[in-house]
Image (spheres, helix red, strand yellow):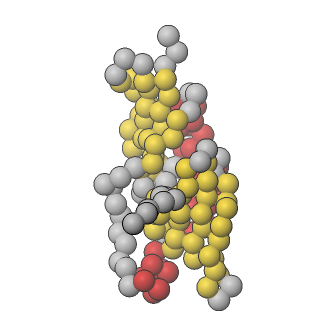
Amino acid sequence: MNFNSPQINLYVDNLEKSKGFYQNLGFAQTFVAEIDGKPVHYELILDGFKLGIASKESAKEIHGLNPGQNMGCEIAVWTEDTDSAIQYLIENGATMLSHPHNFLNDLRSGWVQDPDGNPIQIVCKRKK
């Protein structure tokens, strides 16, 4: 048995709002699934990482799933300046979870939530 092409899928309340949020992070749309002419799932890519976003409504109606808010995982995105990146994300719809702070010997990190409450870690190597 061979497994390949892994990705993370997030279930969201507002598909278009979430797509715009992740495009503001630099993700580019690579695929859209439509049912009756209505988008129900997008795939986006950033630096080789594929992220799927699907409407909670379609997950319930099409697949019989009942997705809820999940804080058991996060998306981590590296940047050159954690503080500036988090400020940018807050200005574009994110909610602060953890203010930027130094940790380990050389990292600076903070957390925000996307519009559906999914945590995103923003991290950079501190300049010495």
Instruction: Residue at 53%, 65% (x, y): give it.
Output: 53
> 90 and 6: which one is in front?
6
Point out residue 126 in the picture as x, y percentages from the top left corner. Answer: 49, 19
Residue reaching furthest to the front: 1
Instruction: Residue at 44%, 26% (x, y): give it.
Output: 108
Instruction: Residue at 64%, 80% (x, y): give it.
Output: 34
> 29 and 118: which one is in front?
29
Instruction: Residue at 61%, 53% (x, y): give it.
Output: 45
Of the 4 image quadrants, the one containing the N terminus is bottom left
Point out residue 50 in the picture as x, y percentages from the top left corner. Answer: 55, 55
Residue reaching furthest to the top: 128
Q: Quadrant of residue 88?
A: top right
The image shows residue 49, relative to residue 29, as above or below, that is above
Q: Quadrant of residue 117?
A: bottom left
The image shows residue 92, relative to residue 60, as above or below, that is above
Tell me, yes or no, if residue 14 can be seen here. no
Q: Left of 32 or right of it: where is 49?
A: left
Total numbered labels placed on residues in the image? 0
> 37 and 100: which one is in front?
37
Residue reaching furthest to the left: 72
Q: Quadrant of residue 28?
A: bottom right
Point out residue 9 in the picture as x, y percentages from the top left corner. Answer: 47, 63
Tell me, yes or no, if residue 63 can be seen here. yes
Point out residue 24 in the picture as x, y percentages from the top left corner. Answer: 64, 49
> 51 and 57: which one is in front?
51
The image shows residue 16, relative to residue 115, as above or below, that is below
